[in-house]
Amino acid sequence: MIATPADFDTANKPVRVLHLEDSAADHELARLALRRAPVAHELTQVDTLAALMQALRGGQFDLVLADYRLRGFTAIDAWQQAQTLAAHPPFVLLSGAIGEAAAVNALHLGFADYLLKDDMARLPHVIARAIEMAEARCAREQAAAELAASERRLAELAEHLQATIEEERAAIAREIHDDVGGALTAARFDLAWIARHAGGDAAMAEHAHSANEMLQHALGASQRIMMNLRPPVLDQGLVAAVRWLAQTFERRTGMRCAVLAPQQPLSIAQALQLVAYRTVQEALTNVQKYAQARQVRVELSEHEGLMLLEVCDDGMGVAPGALGKSHSFGLRGLRERARRAGGWLDVSSQQGRGTCVVLTLPVAGGADTGQSPP
């Protein structure tokens, strides 16, 4: 195991080198070369693969210094044996007769460096550089692992927040239906009673009629809010829900919204239907706000275990680089939701030629969506 930078203190600890060498004379030459170095070195000799592996498992070495050709095996064999360990120090090749091709092959395999025995005076410098490079590589790998773990935690948090939002939407929708809707309906009955018993009072009847219209408007608004929060139409399947979205979009905007979908219900997992539904909802919202389009096409299809959803408009398109802006949270959220569901989302656009949002999902649910079926 290689020492970490925090453990490596040249003022107090020697550099621990495991020397794979079957020649006592060459081992002594290496020891003499390292004695002249400004930093103390502790050199331990082994001459078999078994001894090398035992030393690596039991010792704390900063580097392995290996002769290329030993009795019955080579430094390449030693390197391959070391790969079976969870961690091992860097290898430096030290040989008296090694061809350029063999040296290059060793470097390609992962050796930190190589040195000819005729150039032994450079050994302290080569060892120091190899250890420094190994420490830098370990630091990069640790930073990359920490970054990956951080990104994974952020993705899990985002999915948890999204699932919580959907749960809250469903709860609010139920309260609107049960409490607000019930209270408004009861008020309409009371107003109807007042209107019937106005006793010819035209002013009272007019006020009752006006209040009844306001209540009807409030009931319609509550139903729209409830549908946006948690659409009951999803219980009839994804195709029905998408058709309802398209019809609502047409009534609200005046734009034509065509839906192309198979007659038979799609076999997409229930937990993924909300992912597709929210994608259509967000895409249509963006069309209404930004596209300046005349018509929209929503297409649903299923091929080889994948569901394909396309929302395309003939609007002004998106300027290059606009999709990567820091405020593009809607599409970023859709991409992350698709990724967590085992699918992916692509957006293609050309200025003046419209925009297409394409969602691909596994019909059986390829990953944890992080949320319960709607």
Image: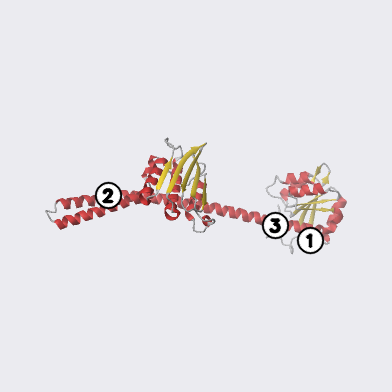
Compare residues 135 and 221 and report the one nearer the observer. 221
Give the CA distance from mark 2 to mark 1: 85 Å
Amino acid, disc 1: Ala
Residue extending furthest top?
A: 264
- The quarter holding residue 140 reads bottom right
Report whether residue 301 is seen. yes
Q: Nearer the viewer, residue 70 or 104?
A: 104
Label 3 Cα crowd, 10 Å radius (few <14 / some 14-19 / many 20+): many
Q: Position of residue 149 (x, y in %)?
A: 57, 53
The mark found on residue 124 in the picture is none
> Image quadrant for the C terminus?
top left
Answer with left or right where residue 235 lies relative to residue 316: left
- Name which of mark 1 and mark 3 comes first in the sequence: 1
Q: Pick whichever of labels 2 and 3 is earlier in the sequence.
A: 3
Q: Mark 1 or mark 3: which is in front?
A: 3
Q: Do the residues under discs 1 and 3 have CB atoms within 8 angstroms? A: no
Horizontal side, residue 78 vs residue 363: left or right: right
Query: Which of the marked residues, 2 or 1, is nearer the chain's N terminus?
Result: 1
Look at mark 3 in the image and give the residue it sits on.
Answer: 135
Q: Residue at x 38, y 40 (%)?
A: 236
Foreground label between 2 and 1: 2
Q: Residue 182 got which mark?
A: 2
Rendered location of residue 293, percent (x, y): 44, 51
Q: How far from the left and from the top, in percent, is residue 178? A: 30, 48
Marks 2 & 1, CB-CB < 8 Å contact = no
Disc 3 secondary structure class? helix
Q: Nearer the viewer, residue 315 or 98?
A: 315
Looking at the rendered structure, the secondary structure element under dot 1 is loop
Q: Secondary structure at mark 2?
A: helix
Q: Is residue 243 left or right of residue 24?
A: left
Mark 1 sits on what residue? 40
